[in-house]
């Protein structure tokens, strides 16, 4: 008689725990599958860029809209510093703001030049990983009915509690890495003077 | 940069134009092996190359033969402007888009055995299976490969080569090179090309034909790829501060993407500087 209540309590406890686990499982699974903040951010910004590319607006209007996206969502100072590589330290502080502005315009020009590569039906997020503290890689693809889907990867960083885009990879090429390679070539050609990048970017406007 | 053939490392590498695989395979293999042995150290700290160490401190690709490479690049660029690009433009003008697409599909289809074999060697059974299925679907339902029916049915096209296989096996890439006609390469990539050329069934099917006939698939591939990349390369050439440097960086990044099958290897990504606000 004494053993029966224990067994019964143990059985009931198992049943209750099991039921709780079953009830929690869908929400746990949902949590695991739910988009991370970085993924949600990229989906929002990425579809914004896609909408600009797909719109029937004029080239200058698209450029202006994309420039707003750059201002609001791309960490230009960090990208600009990265693009200078080891020469970043030697760029005079007086020139930094101008450099940031010129780089922003340069990226806007690149966007316009590569509009065809960016157009598509929808941006689909396919996953993400956390590379380090506040450093995320989000994978996605631009879905296109008329031609093959295009893989696009994003590097998102968290600065001051805010997510910003640092780099984007289209068809295997990271923009920031490509810029660093080209800027290094410009600066090395001018005897290692970091200020040479300003002349180069001004000349491209 | 979109526009390069699916998964390929773009025009500069696709311009194999080997004038017959058999003619160049052996000297290509020998040259690559010599370069492997003779390559200077990628960094002062470690004499062994691997893809991560090929990138030096300022983010550029280690290019110990840069002066010679630039000369070769200039020669290749001149040949491209004077010969290959005009031929590609003519191909576009005189051959309808549907026919060009058929040629492109057929050439990719003909390369399937090489992709299949390399997928097996890399232990990538998913890609091997995909390539196998694609081959038979396109052979029978795609008019011998002219129509990529398999892609529309959900079997995407992949591209594998022996250079990628060597990378997966851990072979170092060696220094960046610009090879006459072939374009950007590394010793590992060249060895891979030579092995693929010898392993390609078309090499043996056309073995007894004359040089022009045996070179025709390579020539067709070069023209077809060049036509697909006319605007892309024109844009790069016009917008780049240094065409040589830009192509070098694009080659390196695209090659890494191919080796990693499009996956991002987080450890290989550079660190992001901490910029004070």
Image (spheres, coloured by chain):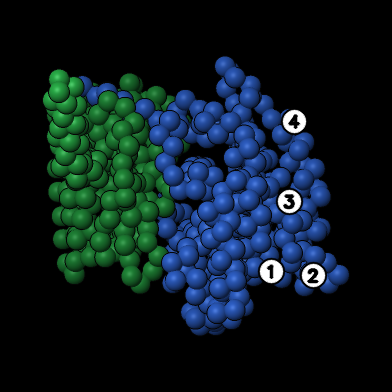
Chain colours: A green, B blue
Seen in the image, is B157 located left or right of residue B191?
left
Q: Residue furthest front?
A: A1
Q: Are marks 2 and 4 on the same chain?
A: yes
Q: Looking at the rendering, which quadrant does residue A100 occupy?
A: top left
Give neighbour class at mark 3: few <14, some 14-19, many 20+ (Cα, 10 Å): many
- From the image, state whether disc 2 or disc 4 is nearer to you: 2
Q: Which chain hosts label 1?
A: B
Q: Which mark is residue B194?
A: 3
Which image quarter: residue B21? bottom right
Q: Marks 2/4: CA distance?
A: 33 Å
What whole-number distance in Å separates the C-alpha atoms at marks 3 and 2? 16 Å
Q: Disc 3 vs disc 4: which is toward the camera?
A: 3
User: Of callouts 1 and 3, which one flags the residue occurring earlier in the amino acid sequence?
Assistant: 3
- Residue A38, numbered circle: none
Residue A125, percent across and down?
Answer: 28, 51
Residue B124 seen anywhere in this rendered image of the structure: yes
Q: Is residue B154 left or right of residue A137?
A: right
Nearest to N terminus: mark 2 or mark 4: 4
Cα distance in 3D space between marks 3 and 4 = 17 Å
The residue tagged 4 is B37
Which mark sits nearer the N-terminus, 4 or 1?
A: 4
Residue B24 in the image: above or below residue B151: above
The quadrant the N terminus of chain A occupies is: top left
Same chain letter for marks 1 and 2: yes
Sequence order check: which comes first, mark 3 or mark 4? 4
């Amino acid at each position: 008689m004494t053993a029966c209540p224990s067994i019964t309590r143990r059985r009931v406890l198992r049943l209750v725990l099991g039921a709780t686990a079953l009830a929690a499982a869908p929400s746990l699974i949902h949590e695991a599958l739910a988009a991370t903040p970085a993924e949600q951010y990229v989906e929002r910004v990425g579809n914004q860029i896609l909408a600009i590319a797909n719109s029937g607006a004029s080239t200058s209007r698209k450029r202006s809209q994309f420039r707003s996206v750059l201002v609001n969502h791309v960490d230009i100072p960090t990208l600009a510093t990265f693009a200078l590589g080891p020469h970043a330290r030697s760029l005079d502080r007086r020139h930094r703001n101008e450099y940031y502005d010129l780089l922003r315009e340069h990226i806007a020009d690149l966007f316009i030049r590569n509009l065809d590569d960016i157009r598509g039906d929808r941006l689909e997020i396919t996953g993400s990983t956390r590379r380090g503290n506040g450093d995320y890689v989000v994978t996605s693809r631009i879905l296109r009915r008329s031609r093959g889907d295009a893989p696009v990867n994003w590097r998102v960083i968290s600065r001051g509690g805010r997510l910003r885009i640092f780099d984007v990879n289209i068809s295997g090429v990271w923009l920031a890495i490509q810029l660093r390679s080209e800027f290094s070539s410009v600066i090395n050609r001018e005897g290692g003077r970091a200020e040479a990048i300003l002349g180069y970017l001004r000349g491209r406007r | 940069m979109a526009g390069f053939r699916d998964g390929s490392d773009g025009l500069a590498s696709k311009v194999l134009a080997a004038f017959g695989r058999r003619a160049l395979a052996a000297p290509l293999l020998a040259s690559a092996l010599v370069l492997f042995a003779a390559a200077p150290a990628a960094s002062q700290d470690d004499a062994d190359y691997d893809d991560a160490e090929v990138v030096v401190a300022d983010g550029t690709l280690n290019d110990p033969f840069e002066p010679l490479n630039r000369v070769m690049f200039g020669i290749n660029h001149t040949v491209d402007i004077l010969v290959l690009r005009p031929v590609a433009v003519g191909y576009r003008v005189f051959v309808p888009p549907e026919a060009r697409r058929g040629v492109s599909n057929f050439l990719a289809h003909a390369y399937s055995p090489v992709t299949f074999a390399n997928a097996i060697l890399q232990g990538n059974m998913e890609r091997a299976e995909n390539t196998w299925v694609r081959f038979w679907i396109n052979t029978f339902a795609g008019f011998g490969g002219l129509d990529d029916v398999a892609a529309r049915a959900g079997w995407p096209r992949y591209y594998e080569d022996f250079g990628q296989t060597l990378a997966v096996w851990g072979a170092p890439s060696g220094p960046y090179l610009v090879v006459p006609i072939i374009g950007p390469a590394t010793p590992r990539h060249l060895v891979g090309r030579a092995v693929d050329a010898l392993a390609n069934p078309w090499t043996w099917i056309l073995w007894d034909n004359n040089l022009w006939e045996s070179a025709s698939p390579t020539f067709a591939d070069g023209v077809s790829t060049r036509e697909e990349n006319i605007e892309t390369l024109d844009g790069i050439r016009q917008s780049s501060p240094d065409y040589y440097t830009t192509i070098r960086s694009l080659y390196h990044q695209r090659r890494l993407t191919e080796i990693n099958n499009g996956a991002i290897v987080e450890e290989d990504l550079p660190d992001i500087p901490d910029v004070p606000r």
